[in-house]
Image (cartoon, coloured by chain):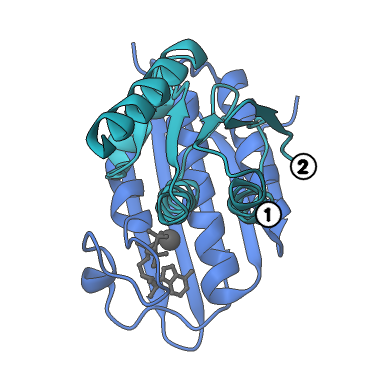
Amino acid sequence: MRDELAIHIASDADIVKARQEGRALAERIGFSGSDLTIIATAISEVARNIIKFAKRGEIVLQRVDRNPRDGILVIARDDGPGIPDIPLAMQDGFTTGHGLGLGLPGCRRLMDEFAIESSVGEGTTVSMKKWVSS
Amino acid sequence: MEVPILKQGHYLIATFQAALTDEDLLKLQDALVERVGKFRSRGVIVDVTALDVMDSFAARTLRALAHMVRLRGADTVIVGVQPEVAFAMVQLGLTLEGVATALDLEEALLLLNSRAKGVGARAR
Ligand SMILES: Nc1ncnc2c1ncn2[C@@H]1O[C@H](COP(=O)(O)OP(=O)(O)OP(=O)(O)O)[C@@H](O)[C@H]1O
Ligand SMILES: [Mg+2]
């Protein structure tokens, strides 16, 4: 039983792979029902951002031990162009990629914890957590 | 993974699998629009019952598909959005605005039939 894995993201097939691995790990951690879909959806969004804006990167999925219930940590990392204005990028509807501009703000709503770090020319790291609910 | 497209009378039915890549979705969109023209179909039913995730890309593609199909004179009905998937879509902020949805195939067919009648009645 692997509770930490890294998935290289370089094509749209990798987006599907990442969300499937994420769902499988979440299930092992104890998530069920709509939480599994929520986690898979959030992974799909950050993985697609990697492909769209940075071409390649990785998704790290990890179990987080916490009492009384565990959680999942999802990290999406790339060495792409970075985000110049994070508060702007976090706004519903803001997009530089002809999208709906819902990926990042949507992930913040889907997950329990959400953090983003980015510097222009260096890359972007999104970290998200969700805890198993009672 | 190719999405099979079934022709049933005046309608086309496409059934999604769980794991569709963005490329699969775009291919399906093209294939459906092409076939609506070729078969002069009046309606398209997209069955997403098996789909694991409806993310921003999938929702955008379905909306674009429905729009293109409309421009070719046919209607689109999305069938089988699962409760968990709907829940995640709402939190993400996604809508299928302007796209008809139905609970199952039967309801979708009823919807398309009634629309076809509606158009006929208006034309008379
Ligand atoms: N990994 C990244 N590297 C560089 N820029 C990014 C990255 N992720 C997001 N961005 C920037 O933040 C903006 C908002 O991202 P978000 O995912 O919310 O929307 P989108 O990808 O443009 O559209 P959608 O996700 O709705 O299809 C993007 O348009 C892009 O400018
Ligand atoms: Mg996005």
> In what element is the residue under mark 2?
loop
**Residue A78: x percent and y percent?**
57, 70
Q: Which residue is mark 1?
A: B27
Q: Is residue B112 left or right of residue B3?
A: left
The answer to which of A21 and B86 lies nearer the viewer is B86
Which residue sits furthest front? B124
- In this rendering, is residue A87 above or below A127? below
Based on the displayed image, in which of its 4 quarters is residue B78 positioned? top left
Label 2 with label 1: CB-CB less than 8 Å: yes
Picture residue at 47% right of the left edge, 38% below the top: B54
Chain letter, colour blue in render: A
Earlier in the chain: of badge 2 and badge 1, it is 2
In the image, which disc is placed on residue A92? none
Q: Which residue is mark 2?
A: B2
Instruction: Tell me the kind of residue under disc 1.
Output: Lys
The quadrant the C terminus of chain B occupies is top left
Q: Chain of mark 1?
A: B
Q: Is residue B11 left or right of residue B6?
A: left
Based on the displayed image, in which of its 4 quarters is residue B40 positioned? top right
**Residue A128: x percent and y percent?**
41, 46
Chain letter, colour cyan in render: B
Based on the displayed image, in which of its 4 quarters is residue A93 positioned? bottom left
**Residue B55: x percent and y percent?**
46, 45
Instruction: Tell me the kind of residue under disc 2.
Output: Glu
Q: In this rendering, does residue A12 appear at all?
A: yes
> In what element is the residue under mark 1?
helix
The alpha-carbon separation of the residues under discs 2 and 1 comes to: 8 Å
Picture residue at 68% right of the left edge, 37% below the top: B19
Q: Is residue A82 left or right of residue A76?
A: left
